[in-house]
Amino acid sequence: MALRIERDRERGVALVVLDRPKKLNAIDLETAGELASLWRELRYDESVRAVVLTGAGTRAFCTGIDRGVEVPQPPSPYAIDDPLLRIGPKANDLWKPVIAAVEGMACGGAFYLLGEAEFVVASREATFFDPHTTYGMVSAYEAIAMAQRMPFGEVARMALMGTAERVSAERAYAVGLVSEVTEPGGAVAAALRAAAVIAGYPTEAVQGTVRAVWSAKEAARTQAMAQAPPLISLGNLPPDRQAELFGARGGGGEPRVR
């Protein structure tokens, strides 16, 4: 199992942990399937009224798709198969509140998860970045997800700067991506405290509020997501060239943190 789940039925809170620390909690096909199944399962679990999502260890929340995964693609520039499209709670029709707790790196495909959380709590040592352009890939779904949470210029800068720059937890808090910054190692505890408060309220009111907040931006998000497949198919370099750039670590050098 690539996921761990701990249910506190007394408080009505579940802790979901991406449990691949040696892979920096990158998501392979097994993990993607487990996430989708878990969100659908939680729809029917009345003992769980709020969820905290985090990654095992302190090095990374999630680093996106596992580079060892091979995903066959249809022979059309207007379609793309993306296993990460179904890993989020909203993609699986779960409208119970989900809080993300970030320690370490959150990058690339991690934004599929952060983009479908109600809010994000991060350790002071957390960093956020989007490596796609560095490796010859279009940042489409990730950039669209973050555009729902951050100012346009901040999203554009993060997506275009690739691995050369990382957004600090303090900067992420300043621009609205993160709602609370904790001391190192404290993100999960802070997220669990918030989840317990929310879980203590009448569930109908909570889930109705979640739906109301999402409805405010869902139309624009849906339209934008529909444009992503052809942009990715037409703009991505061939896989072997991506791998070559990935192996070169984006030209070397330490990324700047801001």
Image (tube, rainbow, N blue to C red):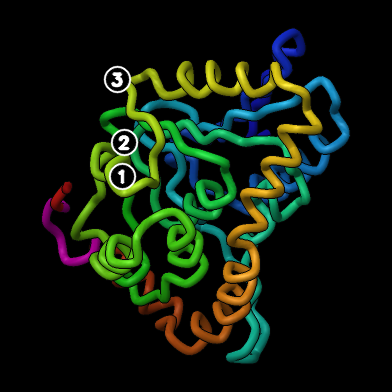
* Mark nearer the viewer, 1 or 2: 1
Which residue is at 35% across, 76% downward? 136
Residue drawn at the location 26% of the way across and 65% of the way down = 157
What segment carries the magenta color? Answer: 249-255
Q: Position of residue 216 (x, y in %)?
A: 61, 58
The residue shown at (78%, 28%) is: 203
Residue at which label 3 appears: 183
Which numbered tag is attached to residue 172? 1
Asked whether residue 250 is drawn in magenta, I would say yes
* Quadrant housing the N terminus: top right
**Label 3 crowd (10 A; few <14 / some 14-19 / many >=20):** few
Dot 2 corresponds to which residue? 126
Give the structural element (helix, strand or loop) at label 3. Answer: loop
Vertical relation: 133 (above or below) 21: below
Between marks 3 and 2, how big is the CA–CA gap? 10 Å
Q: Amino acid at mark 3?
A: Glu
Circle 1 SS class? helix
Q: Relative to residue 232, is residue 112 depicted above or below?
A: above
Depth check: 90 or 199 in front? 199
